Amino acid sequence: MHVKNLLSILLVLGSVSCKNILIFNPIFGLSHVKFISKMANIIADHGHNVTLFQPFHIALKNTEGLIKNKYIEIINYYPDHYDELLKTETATFPAFWDSHLMNNPVLSAFMIPKAIAGEFERTATQLLKDKVALDDLKSRNFDVIISETFELTGMYIAHMLNVPCIPVWSAVRFTIFNNIFGQPSSLGYSQQPFSKLAPEAGFIDRLNDVYRNFFFTITMDGMGQYQNDFIEKAVGRPLPYWKDLIKEAPVYFTNSNEYLDFAVPTTATIVHIGGFTMDLEKMKHVDPLPDKYAKILEERESTVLISFGSVIRSYQMPDNFKAGIIKMFESLPDVTFIWKYERDDVEFQKKLPKNVHLKKWVPQHSLLADNRVKLFVTHGGLGSTMEVAYTGKPALMVPIFGDQPENANMLARHGGAISYDKFELADGEKLAITIRDMVRNPKYNKNAQELLKVLSHQPIDPKLNLMKHLEFAMEFPNLRSQVPAINQMGLIAHYYLDVIFFLSLIFILTVYLTFKIISLLPIRIVKSKID
């Protein structure tokens, strides 16, 4: 074990006792599952007794092997309809590629909550009614439960078991919950799609910020409310409002990294642990590439890796997007491309030039660590964003939906990446110009390496930050003093709008009366002279 990591573990273990911890890990999105699994490994590595409870909402593959610590007990909860899930192809949401309905903030605010949160309802309902499963969890006498806030069932199970619950969020930020814990508005601090940041931001940018932030809040609020309703229905009695339940926690963990993310005002209760999933030592000693990939990297001086993640599939990309990418391939014959393409498609393969290799799976980590890979074209999921940042590799970020636009802008502001509009994939000529510049211009690699250097030398190790705050939260589960008192006030009092209105009114009246008095003075002077 690396000396620095060993010292960190001893520092933590020297000041705390072993706790019995339940980590609620709903099986839905692979990135969420990997985040929670990594957290479980780290907590167990620090000497705590960890039980990982995994209710299956989908029959997600590629989860085996995520738990490395042999002392973690895994409880897989398979619903009665699991056989049906096995036969159902994992939802990939292809409409997000180019649907203007799904990409419209107003329409998506009313479509997304049920489309996503509805996926949780069936398994969650069965679990909440399963007295045997709940009694088993209760008998284990957990000291604390850790649960992600994307899927709220774990928070309510903690409430039903009367166990303190610590919420976590596997993305950079969740506006609704951040507000609950006292974070001021991030408007103007973090970048919205199609907006510029200060000082370039103008009125239209600020108007777009408010517009998108408003409807994104409605979307996330709708997801929470939808879950609140079906959970209450399943339990059969009134339960605490979901926001009130969340805010009982002494800390709220997010996957933001303060040296990578936008600089946003926050509070001590919101703890940023982004980067704790990255092992810098391991990343310096990656597994060797399989021979077939090593041979591919030898074909040309420069290689570009393309992957759009696991939720959005390349083979479901619109034909005009594919046509633009093919034109880009043809325009760059001196560059080798490895494209993660999830389906065998002989006819599509025939359309591609010889410098393109389609692969249903790629060893992404090992490829990014290889100097012959000059550029990573990615959708901008937070897992890939963290990985590319911690490998110092330039990236062309092509966000598709969700938090990806923010992740793309977050990384691009450091100068080693570019945020690229997905609809412009259809423009093969522009795409080729952009990729050619990123491959040949050394500034992108230089800036990416500079960011890696910063992340490698950040003052507080994210793993240690996680453990110290977790121990603190378990020691003081009822602490609420770090949430600003003003946060309990309404919108008017919170932003002093009544005082601003009052002072504005006094100012207007003063100006008006002054103007009236001055306007009457000449008349009085004339009258006095006549008299």
Image: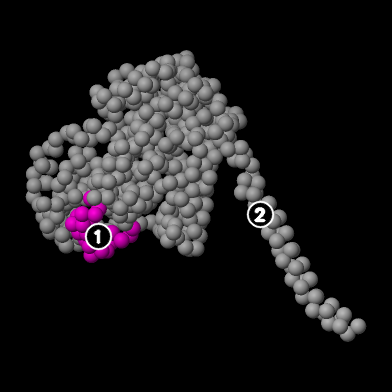
In this rendering, the answer to whether 104 lies above or below 54 is below
Residue 168, quarter of the rendered image: top left
Among numbered discs 1 and 2, the one appearing first in the sequence = 1
Residue 49 visible in the picture: no
Crowd class of label 1 (few under 14; some 14 to 19; many from 20; radius 10 Å): some
In the displayed structure, 22 sits above or below 318; it is: above
State which quarter of the image contains the N terminus: top left
Q: Residue at x 72, y 66 (%)?
A: 511
> Where in the figure is residue 520, as x and y percent of width and height?
80, 75
Q: Position of residue 352 (x, y in %)?
A: 15, 56
Q: Main secondary structure of the magenta part?
A: helix
Instruction: Provide the residue designation for mark 1.
Output: 434
Residue in the picture at 42% in, 58% down:
196
Observer-side mark, 1 or 2, equals 2
Q: Residues within 10 Å of mark 2 (few under 14, many from 20)?
A: few
Q: Tell me the quarter of the image containing the C terminus.
A: bottom right
Query: What's the residue type where badge 1 is placed?
Result: Thr
Which disc number belongs to residue 500?
A: 2
Residue visible at 17% across and 42% down?
370
Residue type of the residue flagged with mark 2? Ile
Q: Position of residue 161 (x, y in %)?
A: 52, 21
Instruction: Kindly state the secondary structure of the residue where label 2 is placed.
Output: helix
Q: Give the quarter of the image for residue 237.
A: top right
Query: Magenta stretch?
Result: 421-445
- The number of discs equals 2
Q: Is residue 294 left or right of residue 158?
A: left
At a point 8% along the width and 47% down the height, the residue shown is 298
Is 355 positioned to the left or the right of 388 in the image?
Answer: left
Q: Nearer the viewer, residue 70 or 436?
A: 436
Secondary element under disc 1, as helix, strand or loop, is helix
Residue projecting furthest to the right: 531
